[in-house]
Image (cartoon, grey):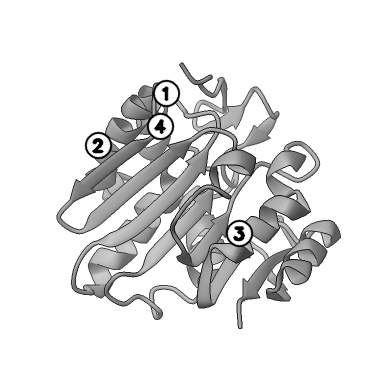
Amino acid sequence: MNQTQRIDWRDGEVPVSALFDDPFFSLEDGLAEARHVFLAGNGLPDRFQPGFHVAELGFGTGLNLAATWAAWRQAGPDGPLQFTSFEAFPMRPDEARRALAAHPGLAFAALVIAEALEIAKGETARIAVEDLVLTVVVGDARATLPAWDGRADAWFLDGFSPAKNPELWEPDLLAAVAAHTAPGGSCATYTAAGAVRRALAGAGFTVDRLAGYGRKRHMSVGRMP
């Protein structure tokens, strides 16, 4: 069985990883952060089209999925959103539901996220509903991502901070991200750490630094030619 994430709760509302001593999302507004960094950073929802595939490093609470799925529903492309997330330490379903309860508008996604995390306790989870195909690939992304047979149109790079979770920011892993990015695809992350930006550029992305969300002055985005 895979190791599950251990959670502490800050002010009873914000989940903090006890493994990495880092919050899962902004202390100010996690949903607004997801929309600013991962959606806007990847040019979404404007780039949505049938068959669009989002991939993510770090599933966490499922908040990024929920925000993306809500935007997909509002945009209304034909067919389901494809969403693949790589997660080494799945959160317990009840804790994900607790974290998402702060956003009643995302209640439609919370049940699917909880179901995926229940499956992910023991194996990779795949759930298909009318307008979403969700896969949560369980295990160390340094092993699972290179073996993945998919390619993403947009990447959400959402591991814990590079200082506390350096494994998800290693140059070899970011090179694997680039290798599994469709031509013209993109990536976005809340971090503007120089080592991360250099690794993304070395992997083939054109990298820019943009204004970050909340207390973070800058974030990084990349585009694959």
Q: Are marks 2 and 1 in contact (CB under 8 Å)?
A: no
The one nearer the camera, 127 or 163, is 127
Residue topped by disc 4: 96
Which mark sits nearer the N-terminus, 3 or 2? 2
Residue 20, horizontal then vertical, whole percent: 69, 29
Could you tell me the amino acid type at mark 1?
Arg
Q: Are marks 4 and 3 in contact (CB under 8 Å)?
A: no
Whole-Å distance between the Cαs marked 3 and 2?
Answer: 29 Å
Residue 80 sits above or below residue 60 on the image: below
Residue topped by disc 3: 177
Could you tell me the amino acid type at mark 2?
Leu
Seen at 43% across and 34% down, the residue is 99
Whole-Å distance between the Cαs marked 3 and 1?
Answer: 26 Å
Whole-Å distance between the Cαs marked 4 and 3?
Answer: 26 Å
Residue topped by disc 2: 111
Which of the 4 quarters of the picture holds residue 214? Answer: bottom right
Dot 4 falls on a residue whose secondary structure is helix
Dot 2 falls on a residue whose secondary structure is helix
